[in-house]
Image (cartoon, helix red, strand yellow):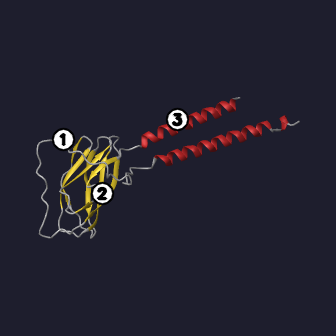
Amino acid sequence: MKLSRAATALVLAGAALVASAAPALAHTELTGSNPAAGASLATPPTKVELTFEEPVSAVAGGLAITGPDGARWTIGKPTVVDKTVSAPVTAEAGAAGAYSLTWKVKASDGDDVTGKIDFTLTAAIPSSTTAPPPATTAAAPSTPVSTAAAAPAADTTGGIPGWVWIIAAVVVLAVAVAFLVRGRRSKSEGPGNEE
């Protein structure tokens, strides 16, 4: 009787562990970006925008754009309005091809969340042309960012994935239950219980 109570308590404790692990490891997700993931642009963007599920904080040096030849574009100081992080971009000379916007922000729980958005520049940037950063004005609400082209494959790792903790909890729980069942069988098959 005591063994079944212990097994029940162990199962309940394991279930509580699994239920509490997933929310603790959940982080905000990217819901939209400009440039959008997979976008083909004829001209370089003058501003980048990232929109998240919940408010985030900017991280110094958290935005970078790298081109096919390894050249990096200049990104100005990021600003945050509600759930959107934006920053001006100055694109120096660069070849047409694949570019990557890598980002790092701080989630509301204090953890860093990172990701990458790939896009393509369809025409080379002449060496004499630089895109000026947009003029800043008084705090105005940010323009909506298209979520239709947001990439669900954007990497948003910020630690150990929740599924790892769930699998670990299930394995520990299964081993504990097997140990308890084996101990119960050993007691019931002991020398005093033989017929």
Q: Earlier in the sequence, mark 2 or mark 3?
A: 3
**Disc 2 secondary structure class:** strand
In the figure, 55 relative to 78: above or below?
above
Pick whichever, 92 or 153, lies toward us. 153
- The crowding category of the residue bearing disc 2, from other C-alpha atoms within 10 Å (few below 14, some 14 to 19, many at least 20), is some
- Find out whether the residues at labels 2 and 3 contact each other: C-beta distance under 8 Å: no
| Whole-number angstrom distance, CA of label 1 to CA of label 3 | 42 Å
Residue behind mark 2: 102
Q: Amino acid at mark 3?
A: Ala
| Whole-number angstrom distance, CA of label 2 to CA of label 3 | 36 Å
In the figure, 110 relative to 88: above or below?
above
Q: Amino acid at mark 2?
A: Thr
Which residue shows up at 26% across the image and 55% down it? 35
Q: Earlier in the sequence, mark 1 or mark 2?
A: 2
Q: Quadrant of residue 125?
A: bottom left
**Which quadrant of the rendered structure holds the N terminus?**
top right
Q: Is residue 165 left or right of residue 147?
A: right
**Which quadrant of the rendered structure holds the C terminus?**
top right
Q: How many numbered callouts? A: 3
**Disc 3 secondary structure class:** helix
Q: Earlier in the sequence, mark 1 or mark 3?
A: 3
- The crowding category of the residue bearing disc 3, from other C-alpha atoms within 10 Å (few below 14, some 14 to 19, many at least 20), is few
Counting from the top left corner in percent of width and height, residue 119 is at 29, 61
Q: Is residue 21 left or right of residue 9?
A: left
Residue behind mark 1: 141
Which residue shows up at 12% across the image and 66% down it? 129
Q: Is residue 154 left or right of residue 126?
A: right
Residue behind mark 3: 16
